[in-house]
Image (cartoon, rainbow, N blue to C red):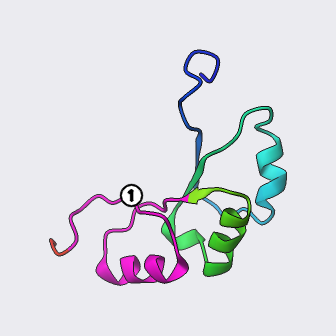
Amino acid sequence: MKERAANVHIGLLLNSRIVKIENYLRSFQPYSVYSVHPHFRTIQAEDVLDFKSNNLKVFPYTVNEQSDLSAMKQFGVDGIISDSIMGES
């Protein structure tokens, strides 16, 4: 994909916790990973710090509840992926 569209960012969808993200990122070399998209229930504040220390943007999925959004904001994520508009049931 990068050979055809060099300006496209690579984002990793993560459905389980990655303990040493730097080791995982090496498997994508020579390409650089722009962002990670972990399921919101699999991350903690220290994970976000670890991702960001590796120059990654963090966009957890599927944050549908206001209480989960508040937690993600406290963790310092860059944005969220959601199935609903906050405030709707």
Question: Image quadrant of residue 82?
Answer: bottom left
Examine the rendered structure and indicate whether residue 64 appears above or below residue 6.
below
Label 1 crowd (10 A; few <14 / some 14-19 / many >=20):
some
Can residue 72 be found in the magenta stretch? Answer: yes
Examine the rendered structure and indicate whether residue 19 appears above or below residue 74.
above
Examine the rendered structure and indicate whether residue 9 appears above or below residue 75.
above
Question: Residue 18's x, y, as percent?
Answer: 72, 62
The residue at the point 76 percent across, 58 percent down is 21
Question: Image quadrant of residue 5?
Answer: top right
Can residue 23 be found in the magenta stretch? Answer: no
Question: Residue 57's x, y, as percent?
Answer: 57, 57
Residue farthest to the left, as pictured: 88
Question: Could you tell whether 10 is left or right of 49 in the image?
Answer: left
Question: Image quadrant of residue 65?
Answer: bottom left
Residues in magenta, as a range: 58-86
Q: Nearer the viewer, residue 84 or 5?
A: 5
The residue at the point 55 percent across, 37 percent down is 9
Question: Residue 41's x, y, as percent?
Answer: 52, 72
Q: Quadrant of the C terminus?
A: bottom left
The residue at the point 79 percent across, 50 percent down is 24
Q: Which residue is mark 1?
A: 81
